Amino acid sequence: MSPADTAIEVEGTRRVVRGACPHDCPDACAMLVTVEGDRVTRVQGDPAHPVTQGFLCTKVNRYPERTHHPERVLRPLRRVGPKGRGEFVEASWDEALTDIAARLNAIRHSPDGPEAILPYSYAGTMGILQGESMDRRFFHAIGASLLDRTICATAGMMGMRMTVGASIGTDIEGVPESDLIILWGTNTLTSNPHLWPKVLEARAKGAPVLCIDPIRTRTAEQCDEWIGIRPGTDAALALGLMHVLVAEGLQDDDYLARHTLGADALRARVAEYPPARVAAITGIPAERIVALAQQYGRAHAAFIRINYGLQRHAGGAMAVRTIACLPAITGHWRRAGGGVQLSSSGNFALNKAAVQRPDLIPAGTRTINMSRLGDALTQPDAGVGGPPVRALIVYNSNPAAIAPDHLRVVEGMRREDLFTVVLEHFRTDTADHADWILPATTQLEHLDLHWSYGHHYVTLNTPAIAPIGEARPNTEIFRRLAAAMGLDEPALRDDDETMLQQALDTSDPRMATVTLEALRERGWVRLNLPTPYLPFAEGGFHTPSGKCEFVSERMATLGLDPLPSYTPPYESPERDPALVARYPITLISSPAHQFMNSTFVNVTSLQRAAREPEVSLHPTDAERRGIRDGARVLVANDRGSFEATARLREGIREGVAWAPGIWWAKASPDGRTVNATTSQRLTDMGEGPVFYDNQVEIAVVA
Ligand SMILES: Nc1nc2c(c(=O)[nH]1)N[C@H]1C(S)=C(S)[C@@H](COP(=O)(O)OP(=O)(O)OC[C@H]3O[C@@H](n4cnc5c(=O)[nH]c(N)nc54)[C@H](O)[C@@H]3O)O[C@H]1N2
Ligand SMILES: Nc1nc2c(c(=O)[nH]1)N[C@H]1C(S)=C(S)[C@@H](COP(=O)(O)OP(=O)(O)OC[C@H]3O[C@@H](n4cnc5c(=O)[nH]c(N)nc54)[C@H](O)[C@@H]3O)O[C@H]1N2
Ligand SMILES: [Mo]
């Protein structure tokens, strides 16, 4: 598909092309892209799309500014200075591919073997093609180490899997029918803004909207009530709510009997969580816990939106699992708008195996957890046995800024014996550590196909303009690299159109509506599900028992508590009082409104709006430390430190601080991001990172 064939409207030199927002956000928006000559002048939300509803967010409205940015990397760049200094010279694609192919082949055929090569990617683009297609085939075919992509969502995903069996939840198109909305550990207006109009529709019909968050975020400010919970204690709150529901007879006995497993055992468990105990754990007054449970129990279709914020703690999976039990106790799954949503991804039955070809993986290939990249690069056996990591190939990610314990990551990337290739749009912190930077296309320049983790539409992205400079799609770069390395696997030659068709080639009935013809015609298509879709109205859970599992055999097998329970944070008074005495402040580093993780940090208008790396804290905590608003402070713990500007904020729990992220290290006052303080520890299930399970101390910089 060339840019010329895909216009839906042409007027002189002006064309409008259909696209999809590629970013890591549940909203997966359908875009209309206006092109004048060879420049994109505007991106808009598709007004016809039931979720996008004609608007894009603060960041993606600036996508043309990002694509046509003067600092785009437009030719291959070869390192000339010391590692990490960011000194490069331009080279031709031929030179780049020849050198990279020779280096990778040498490692592959050395005694260390191909597992010494590590791919590192996440969701810089969520596209099936540019995110997880030819790249996977390439690494599978050479036998590189596998990467466990845990950095964001695996804890919560496991939590949902244990309780309801899949990443499936309430359809947001039913949310206008909800009679109570609880935004629980999610900053909707920042990180899921297209849910908000649905929330407002429900509110207009009388549904109260509550927000449970240690920070009074911009979302909490717009809600009817902010419940400022102590970080990492959500499971205890959910158990307390269940205690009251059961004690006051607010449960749906019929739903419990027919569609749940272990209701009696759960009843016994929640007896251990009376409101007074839960108040002591969560910091929420007992009366409020009782009133919230009554409000929830008396509602008919309460909608709980959990998001990933609350699973970035030691007990993150257990927290999600526990909250996900609530709608089965009250039977709210029966009605439109009722239930819980973490993700809607589980219904997108794209044929990923055809696209990624896991059959090419050599038996016994080792896996490295991306959340422990620091250890993988600095420990000779990568912390998991096997050869040291000798080559690192990064695309769709900026680990030098975003990975936990990033000082360790940077230390590893500075190893003289590590060969690093980075496919990028910009000279990010990670790209600065490369031996080669290869110029990648942006969403406006390549073909792609998108699913969503917040709604039920598949979206096609057609290229609006030709690649700028010598930029190439990730798929094309891996195809060319495979050829330069002399790999003869035929799957490494498929073009993007072919892989797109392979993705759609499935007999799964949920995908019956999703054809290439329909996508070409409208740009997006709803999965073959009713609107609204009520996943568990009649039970039908995806667990082994087919029921909502209050008791989970699988968790018992993993050596975990099979019942919902409260797991305190690693860095909590319950588990490590000595540490908390030294580092009394819990640091939360959730997304800045203006950035998408570390993407957009270099877009001038957005950086200006985000001001500078900041840390907000409660005036009482600030006063105790002699910190004034606007002071330069050092945020530190045993892992590292970073400097930021202090902001005093009433709307935050005492003992909690907020450093919105994720700034580039090189745009930060002392070249360190908030991830200098975060740890490489992992969650209870899913082996995810614990970014917000992080105790620090804050002091004025002398
Ligand atoms: N503008 C913008 N949007 C984004 C992103 C971005 O960087 N910028 N990132 C995208 C990505 S990759 C993701 S994963 C999502 C993340 O978006 P969300 O899933 O919404 O998660 P976070 O923003 O990490 O955290 C949400 C809220 O959880 C709160 N929180 C932290 N700890 C706890 C806790 O223990 N309990 C409770 N109840 N609340 C807690 C935080 O204060 C925060 O306000 O957003 C996506 N959307
Ligand atoms: N402290 C702290 N750290 C966090 C988080 C937090 O809340 N707090 N959130 C975590 C979460 S939820 C996530 S998901 C991760 C996100 O971390 P990453 O997945 O690394 O996301 P980004 O920082 O957005 O970096 C994506 C990079 O991909 C590049 N890119 C985009 N499209 C393309 C493409 O088509 N081709 C190529 N080659 N490159 C492309 C962009 O230019 C950008 O530099 O960060 C995690 N880190
Ligand atoms: Mo994420």
Image (cartoon, helix red, strand yellow):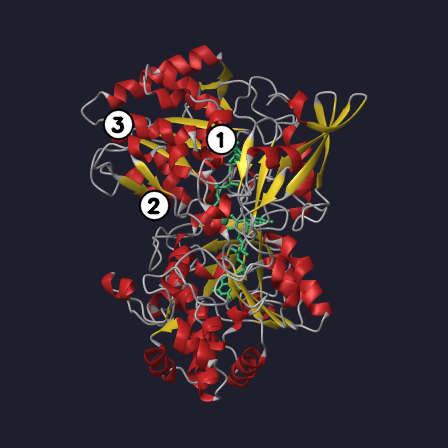
Q: Is mark 1 within 8 Å of ligand 2?
A: no
Q: Which residue is mark 1?
A: 501
Q: Position of residue 395 (x, y in %)?
A: 45, 32
Q: Amino acid at mark 1?
A: Gln
Q: How far is mark 1 from mark 3, CA to CA?
A: 30 Å
Decide if residue 670 is in sight here. Answer: yes
The residue at 26%/27% (across/down) is 114
The residue at 68%/67% (across/down) is 202
Vertical placement of residue 507 versus 420, above or below: below
Q: Which residue is mark 2?
A: 372
Q: Which of 675/273 is in front?
A: 273
Residue count near mark 1 (Cα–Cα under 10 Å), binned few <14, some 14–19, many ≥20: some
Q: How far is mark 3 from mark 2, CA to CA?
A: 20 Å
Q: Is mark 2 within 8 Å of ligand 2?
A: no
Task: Label 2: state its secondary structure.
Answer: helix
Horizontal placement of 552 versus 605: left or right? left
Of the residues under marks 2 and 1, which one precedes in the sequence? 2
Which of discs 3 and 2 lies nearer the camera? The answer is 3
Residue count near mark 3 (Cα–Cα under 10 Å), binned few <14, some 14–19, many ≥20: many
